[in-house]
Image: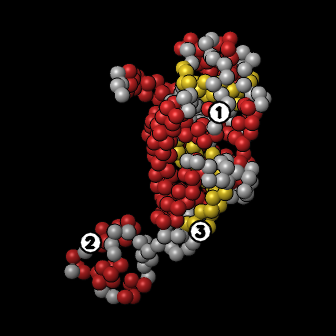
């Protein structure tokens, strides 16, 4: 038997880890040879304890819960070799310091949304949400299969970070108002809690974008500090109780068509992990990505019904001409960003090229289907 084994393929088998250790001992005809070979299939017993800092309040519905699930899955898949402790915003560092903390090695990984880091590198926001941009399905396709991930890795490399997709909210709602929006004039002078590029667009429309922490929005709206607010979708909005203090619930969330959530991992810590633990992190992130979108879809449909049927909320739509004008402001603002920042131009060109193809495909298929939907 020993003589039949081709020496070349035998050692190739060792390199690929496809030859089991008992066979190796038999094949080599003695334990002396086996003792000199490091078996590639034997896992390192080394245990890693990681800290994840997040931009979410502790155990925040869906987003914070997702981080907890991710840590649980990694722990189960690695049989406890990679244990991740999840910290909500403010528990280890304030949420908006998560990026810098992980970059500097103060924590091993973080969870957030890339548009939070637009002040550091404007192109980051293209990996979270672009007003009137790609929905969750299209954004996943661009990042995972259309070259987006390579650009994202390039963008985060100077910060010593490795990005991963870590969920998506799906399309959000347009927000809660105490006045009807019938024309652009109704946005003039409107003080609205709306973050990111959407806030810049509102400012250009004559409104005032206000940044309020999640915990302050309800009181600010109730007391008239703000006239309107967006938040997420029916589930989170119901929990916040906005229907008790606002008359109209507007659709769609033109500013957040399908916001991606992210993980950012300290690159040195990631590179120091054995390959199988790296793959476990990737696999858990991929599982979270589909779980989160599914959880939003499931919860939002239940809570939309509660809002409309039980709370008698008046759902309205932005008039098409208002949306067209907001879209035109969005294009102006993105052009200003890409004119000033070469990396933003490089990434947005890829985003936009991919989007154009995806829109053509969906116009031919899903759009036709949605336009003919019957409940
Ligand atoms: Ca939002």
Question: Quick one: SS at disc 2?
Answer: loop
Distance from the alpha carbon under mark 2 to that under mark 1: 77 Å
Say which of 154 and 101 sits in front: 101
Q: Residue at x 57, y 52 (%)?
A: 65
Where residue 232 appears, as percent x and y from the top left, is 59, 36
Q: Could you tell which of marks 2 and 1 lies nearer the N-terminus?
A: 2
Q: Which mark is residue 6?
A: 2
Q: Nearer the viewer, mark 2 or mark 1?
A: 1
- The answer to whether residue 17 is left or right of residue 148 is left
Q: Is residue 295 above or below residue 207?
A: below
Question: Given contact means CB atoms under 8 Å apart, are the residues at marks 2 and 1 in contact?
Answer: no
Instruction: Give residue 22's quadrant in the image.
Output: bottom left
Distance from the alpha carbon under mark 3 to that under mark 2: 40 Å
Q: Is residue 71 above or below residue 205?
A: below
Q: Nearer the viewer, mark 3 or mark 2?
A: 3
Question: Given contact means CB atoms under 8 Å apart, are the residues at marks 3 and 2 in contact?
Answer: no
Total tally of numbered discs in the picture: 3
Q: Residue at x 69, y 26 (%)?
A: 228
Q: Which mark is residue 365?
A: none
Q: Could you tell which of marks 3 and 2 lies nearer the N-terminus?
A: 2
Image quadrant where one finds the N terminus:
bottom left
Distance from the alpha carbon under mark 1 to that under mark 3: 47 Å
Q: Residue at x 62, y 21 (%)?
A: 330
Circle 3 is placed at which residue position?
Answer: 48
Where residue 360 appears, as percent x and y from the top left, is 40, 22
Circle 1 is placed at which residue position?
Answer: 244
Can residue 90 be seen from the camera position used here?
A: yes
Image quadrant where one finds the C terminus:
top left
Question: Quick one: SS at disc 1?
Answer: helix
Question: Quick one: SS at disc 3?
Answer: strand
């Amino acid at each position: 038997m020993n003589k039949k084994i081709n020496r070349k393929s035998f050692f190739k088998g060792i390199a690929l880890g496809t030859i089991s250790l008992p066979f190796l001992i038999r094949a080599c005809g003695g334990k002396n040879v086996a003792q000199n070979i490091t078996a590639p299939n034997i896992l390192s017993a080394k245990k890693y304890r990681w800290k994840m800092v997040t931009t979410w309040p502790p155990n925040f519905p869906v987003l914070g819960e997702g981080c907890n699930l991710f840590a649980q899955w990694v722990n189960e898949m690695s049989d406890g070799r990679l244990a991740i402790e999840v910290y909500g915003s403010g528990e280890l560092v304030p949420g908006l310091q998560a990026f810098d903390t992980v970059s500097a090695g103060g924590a091993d990984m973080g969870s957030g949304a890339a548009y939070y880091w637009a002040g550091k590198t404007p192109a980051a926001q293209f990996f979270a949400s672009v007003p009137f941009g790609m929905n969750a399905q299209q954004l996943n396709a661009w990042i995972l299969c259309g070259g987006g991930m390579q650009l994202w890795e390039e963008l985060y490399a100077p910060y010593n970070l490795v990005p991963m997709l870590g969920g998506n909210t799906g399309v959000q709602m347009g927000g809660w108002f105490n006045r009807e929006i019938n024309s652009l004039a109704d946005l003039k002078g409107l003080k609205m809690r709306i973050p990111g590029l959407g806030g810049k667009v509102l400012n250009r429309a004559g409104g005032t974008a206000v940044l309020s922490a999640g915990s302050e929005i309800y009181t600010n709206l109730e007391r008239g500090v703000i006239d309107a607010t967006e938040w997420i979708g029916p589930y989170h909005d119901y929990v916040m109780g906005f229907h008790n203090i606002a008359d109209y619930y507007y659709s769609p969330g033109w500013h957040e068509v399908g916001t991606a959530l992210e993980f950012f991992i300290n690159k040195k810590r990631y590179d120091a992990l054995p390959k199988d633990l790296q793959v476990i992190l990737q696999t858990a992130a991929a599982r979270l990505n589909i779980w989160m979108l599914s959880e939003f879809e499931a919860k939002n449909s239940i809570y939309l019904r509660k809002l409309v049927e039980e709370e008698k909320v008046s759902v309205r739509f932005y008039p098409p001409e208002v949306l067209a004008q907001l879209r035109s402001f969005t294009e102006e603002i993105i052009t200003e960003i890409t004119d000033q920042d070469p990396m933003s131009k490089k990434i947005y060109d890829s985003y936009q090229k991919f989007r154009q193809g995806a829109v053509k495909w969906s116009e031919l298929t899903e759009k036709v289907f949605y336009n003919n939907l019957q409940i």
